[in-house]
Amino acid sequence: MCGICGLMMDDSKLRHSPVGSILQDMMESQQIRAQDGAGIAIFNKSNADDSFKIKNFRKEMSDYVIDEVKSSSKNISENLQKLRQDPECHFFSFENEMTILKETGLAKDLDRKFGIRKMNGSHGIGHLRIATSSRVTPFNTHPFSTTILPDIAIVHNGEITNYNMLRDSLELEGFTFHTDSDSEVIAVFLASRILKHGDIEKAHREFVAKADGPFTYIAATSDSIAIVRDKFGTRKGIIGYNPGTDDHPPFWAMATDLSALDVVGATTKIETPHPGKPRIFYRN
């Protein structure tokens, strides 16, 4: 059972809110669920410029290192093509104002290596992984991104049982996959529908209608974060609100377990999202 969490600051103008520190507390509170890997995606519009970052894992000796290539809108396709042709590279993320960091091991290991607690932003998501159907490697760890559009990230608990059918359909539409994880299909599906009609709520509803299996996922874009449960509500998910303190402004939090909300004081306005109905928070 994986652990997932996310939060959106109630005032999205506060780009320097301690999102990383809050996410780190939430992940560590759920660590008992999974210990194979940990990852975060944090959004900070003040980090964005006219370039995009394409990150990938490259195998060096017995370890993996992260390569980062800055691309303008003119040479994104060229750089993505080079990535696909290099068998030693594994896609990591496609970023503009988003920063994804992930690694095998515990949430504390992730913070020790990358300084998660020092990261600020307007919203973000986190994940703790237990491997069930793929190897324990950094590139199989959540959050999952996609080469289709920048700044889309998902974390997922559960199983997409018709993953192969959804993947085959998306590949016939010309979309590329970079892992064998069923979770990646959520990111690719959402990106494909955003390209088609530009409506994130409709994209979530379409995925719920087509996907089978027990799942809860949290998906973030540059302007939204959503928690979505399968149509039968077979996986848990809970939302709470923290009205703010002297140390941080108000925020909405969501997670697999109530313990993750308790540890960060998001204990008012508690609700459980209705099965099959996306609960979306937008950055103003």
Image (spheres, rainbow, N blue to C red):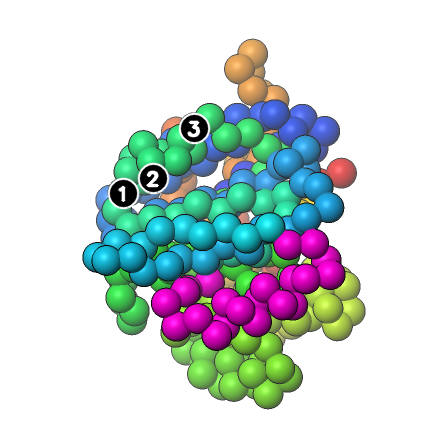
> At 75% from the left edge and 72% from the top edge, which residue is drawn?
196
For marks 3 and 1, the one nearer the N-term is: 1
The residue type indicated by label 3 comes to Arg
Q: Mark 1–mark 2 contact, CB under 8 Å?
A: yes
Q: CA distance from mark 3 to mark 2?
A: 10 Å
- Mark 3 neighbour class, 10 Å CA radius: few under 14, some 14 to 19, many 20 or more: some
Residue drawn at (29%, 69%) of the image: 134
Residue 172 visible in the displayed image: yes
If you read the primary sequence from the N terminus, does the residue marked by circle 3 or circle 2 appear first? 2
Tag 2, which secondary structure?
helix
Check residue 89 for magenta coloring. Answer: yes
Quadrant where the image shows the C terminus: top right
Q: Does the magenta portion include 103?
A: no
Q: In percent of the image, x 56 and y 83: which residue is there?
A: 171
Image vertical order of residue 232 relative to residue 137, above or below: below
> Residue 27 versus residue 209: which sits nearer the camera?
27
Q: Amino acid at mark 2?
A: Leu
Which residue is disc 3 drawn over?
A: 117
Q: Give the answer, above or below, for where 41 lies relative to 241.
A: below
Q: Residue furthest top?
A: 246
Q: Position of residue 165 (x, y in %)?
A: 49, 85
| Residue picked out by circle 2 | 110
Task: Identify residue for label 1.
Answer: 106
